[in-house]
Amino acid sequence: MNFLAVFDLLIPATGAGKAILAAVLLGAGAGLLGSFVVLRRVALMGDAISHAVLPGVVAGLIYSPDRHPGMIFLCAALAGLLGAGIVRALMSTTRLKSDTALGIVLASFFAFGIMWQSRNQAGTAGVMNFLFGNIGSINAADLKMMMVATVLLCVVVFVLKRPLLVMSFDEGFSQALGYPVRILNGIFYFLLTFSVVVALQAVGVVLVSAMLITPAAAAYLLTDKFGKMLLLSMAFGVLSGIIGGVISANVNGMPTGPVITLAATVVFAAVYFVAPKHGVLAKLLRTVKRRRRVRRENTLKAIYQIQESGGFTHEDVSLIEIARKRRNTEDHARKECASLLKYGFIEMSGDGHSVHLTAAGWKRAMEMVRNHRLWELYLTNEANYADDHVHEDAEKIEHILGANTVKQLEKDLDFPELDPHGKPIPQPQLLTPVS
């Protein structure tokens, strides 16, 4: 049994089985290369190549009367590589930017393919399957070709994963490490063309770039680790392919390419909203929590400043004083104090009209005041800001200064005792409550 005969054993007997396997291969191949496409920010290159392969598809249909998939695959791949080569040549020999070069190649190759097909309609029957995709039309020979191509893609990416990854972030650094960047670029665009051609019959020329980009973009929102991103991208691609293939096969009037693309978009939309670190909801929750924390810290600072203005002669601060200092109503001050009480920063008086800081509240209040006054002094001394232009900036930065940064500020400013306005800067040894 030769090597290729093994793939024959894996091909399902039913049409539905072939469609599912084609969807899996499509998702795996596109998802795999898509991760590099997203990281390298060359999404438009995938779009250009996918349109550039159309003349090759037309040539394959015309010059292979028996519609041999190998011939169509070869012609499409050659056209795609020619398109990618012309883009690189335009970018390296002219001052044109990448988007301009991609636009020229995308439009001209696609136009030439459409014109050629229009003049040879009798010999290019079935070209619509390549334009818009038809997973149901994939036969055993097509599947065998897709399996060989997908396995080849996986092997090459596994072997060259590290240099391709380094080059995705910084080609100059790759050269410094001794990687043959020009050769690796050639291999990458060869693989990208390969991946596009593999996906052609499933989603079509027009939408194949979506399968390269959308699953990988969803994976990119979920993880910062490249190995995990590769697996997630492949998984999302496979899932989208299966969902789209099943819907297209069972519902009339549902072309395969658009349905698979929309399935990938739904997956991306779900990840976009619920991704734990980079999702919209997670960012919204973090923003809400940060704003609440800033309000609490501003109220603590106000209580400290009221005590400071009285010479720290009394611990209790009334809600009316807090409201006046914060320029809010007494009810608003009561709500802010309720939040401080919840976190153990204050204790309320018996009549509920005044508060005093706990040890934790005193420590955090002094940290805010110290951060604020140190930053004001840094801006006036080191950045030559006028002392009446530093308050607003310090109001923002005081909440995000870390302990190490504060220590460095104190060292750079020679451990100052007064801010630019002559007010004392709370010292670390005083981070205990007044008695």
Image (spheres, rainbow, N blue to C red):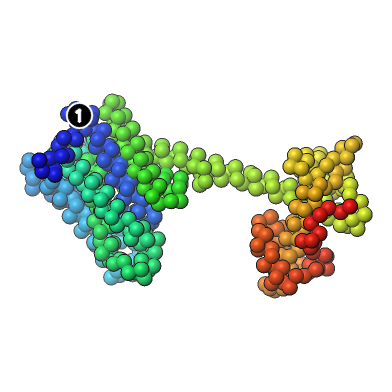
Above or below for 143 versus 86: above
Task: Report whether residue 113 is seen.
Answer: no
Which quadrant of the figure has residue 81?
Answer: bottom left
Rendering quarter of residue 168: bottom left
Q: Relative to the observer, which residue lies in front, 272 or 368? A: 368
The answer to whether 196 is drawn above or below residue 162 in the figure is above
103 vs 390: above or below: above
Q: Residue at x 70, y 70 (%)?
A: 411
Q: Position of residue 414 (x, y in %)?
A: 73, 73
Residue 254: x %, y % from top left: 29, 31
422 vs 334: above or below: below
Q: Residue furthest right?
A: 313
The furthest residue to the left: 65
Q: How packed is label 1: few (under 14 Cα within 10 Å), some, or many (20 or more)?
A: some
x then y, percent, for residue 184 = 28, 62
Which residue corresponds to the image point at 20% horizontal and 29% vertical from the top-left?
15
Q: Please name the residue shown 64% across and 44% down the image.
A: 289
- Label 1 element class: helix
Q: Position of residue 112 (x, y in %)?
A: 19, 53
Q: Quadrant of the N terminus?
A: top left
Q: Nearer the viewer, residue 197 or 150?
A: 150
Q: Could you tell me if residue 277 is visible in this image? A: yes
Q: Which residue is mark 1?
A: 15
Q: Nearer the viewer, residue 177 or 140?
A: 177
Count the marks: how many?
1
Point 81% across, 68% down: residue: 418
Three-letter code for the amino acid on which mark 1 is drawn: Gly
Task: Please indicate whether residue 173 sits to the left or right of residue 277 in the image.
Answer: left
Q: Quadrant of residue 137?
A: top left
